Amino acid sequence: MITEERNYNVINTEQAKKITDDYLTAQLESMENITYGLPEIYDRYDIWNVPVLYKKEVIGEVAVDVYAKNINYKLSSDISILQGRKQRIDRGNIITLNKGERKKGDYRISSLSNMILKGRSELVLNQLPEQSVDLIFTSPPYYNARKQYSEYGTYEDYLALIRKVVKACHRVLIDGKFFVINSSHVLVPRASRNESSSRIAVPFDIHQIFMEEGFEFVDDIIWQKPEGAGWASGRGRRFSADRNPMQYKAVPVTEYVMVYRKKSSVLIDYFIRNHPDQTIIQDSKIADGYEKTNVWYISPARDKRHPAIFPKELAEKVITYYSFKNDVVLDPFGGIGTTAKAAAELGRRFVSIECDDEYVEAARADIGGMSTLFTPVSFEYHDYSGLKDNDDNQRYDLYELIRMLQKMNVSREDMADLLCREYKDRLSGNKREG
């Protein structure tokens, strides 16, 4: 063990906890409800890192010097920070997610069948039962990258759609399970030679939405394509020809596969230990040859029926790494059914939502012709294209508009005037529809 190799004076977790407890007893106003998580050795700094919990919520860490057997203050949470977090928990400003230890009989097994659903995702998701999905994997439409992909009035409109879908997905996803999303920075071409093109960091804005909608960040996986795949964007060609400083632009060959987990006090081990069918756990184990780093080398895919599909190999890896067999895998932007096809082939159930008529029909045709273990893949089809926004969605749109205006530092007077005109336009529109 490293404690023996380096002749540490603090050689086990109990010693590290004891030193931490003596330190906090002398510093905190009260030790009531204070406990400790599992200490870990950070050999780079020669410390034991001891998580400090208050009412089962982590409020900070204490670093114990393994040689001096005292506290490394520089690497420890400040006492004032610990006190402040204790007070916020007591005031109820931090939501305690611990709902009690689940028992084996509480394990959720979704009753959903394979489904292809037609309609707008943010509306169709409301038709699914709460906590009925085990894994969500999707690649939302690109923001105005090319006219044939999708087109939105503003970037704020695009983000508002993503937020609605993430919010609706949070309701249907089982507590403690994963939402994996593929996205990339988008290059918006210049309108003329007198203007510059612009690049929008879409994944970073989507990340903020997940943080605000009840998810915790787990991993950022880089999907790397062959070098030639990036030249289609046109980025980097000017520099390649002229080689002038300040004109350098890297050719994009990567996309982000961001991994989030719905917040829960339940550890991942719970789903492994308490699954009611342990043969499924054994059958779902990952074989050799899995991706060991967060850089995945995968070639792009092409299909004449859709201008922007992602490769089935990408979906297969995500489904294999983040779900068990027989789990329900949801893709809220289903396209021609890439995620659904991968899920079926891997022994999972699928729910694919798509609003485009042609893509829905392509998915139905492809999946209808599939079979696994010589058994045709069956699925339900439901058309929800007639669903419309309700008043709650309209209020949510206004909320998003207010957030956008605040970020733009619009004055309260101008904001009030704009909102009044927006509300008036919606009322007149409702009257026309009536």
Image (cartoon, grey):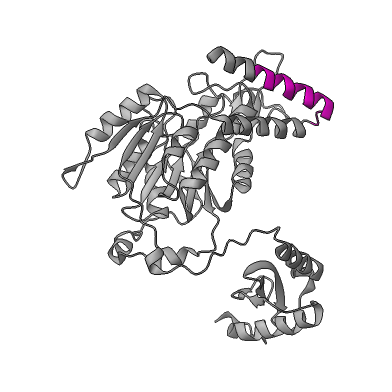
Q: In the figure, residue 360 lies in which quadrant?
A: top left
Near-viewer residue (380 or 158)? 380
Residue 410 is covered by the magenta coloring? yes
Name which residue lies at 34% across and 35% down. 116
Name which residue lies at 45% across and 48% down. 130
Residue 106 is covered by the magenta coloring? no
In the rendered view of the protein, which quadrant contains the N terminus?
Answer: bottom right
Tell me if 220 is positioned left or right of 385 in this view: right
Q: In the figure, residue 68 lies in which quadrant?
A: bottom right
As displayed, is residue 416 above or below residue 192?
Answer: below
Near-viewer residue (221 or 288)? 221
The x and y percentages for residue 222 are 52, 45
Tell me if 165 is positioned left or right of 301 in this view: right
Dominant secondary structure, magenta: helix
The x and y percentages for residue 142 are 53, 29
The x and y percentages for residue 418 are 75, 22
The x and y percentages for residue 408 are 77, 30
Near-viewer residue (55 or 75)? 55
Near-viewer residue (323 or 90)? 90
Name which residue lies at 72% across and 32% down. 402
- Start and end of the magenta stretch? 409-425
As displayed, is residue 330 above or below residue 99?
Answer: above
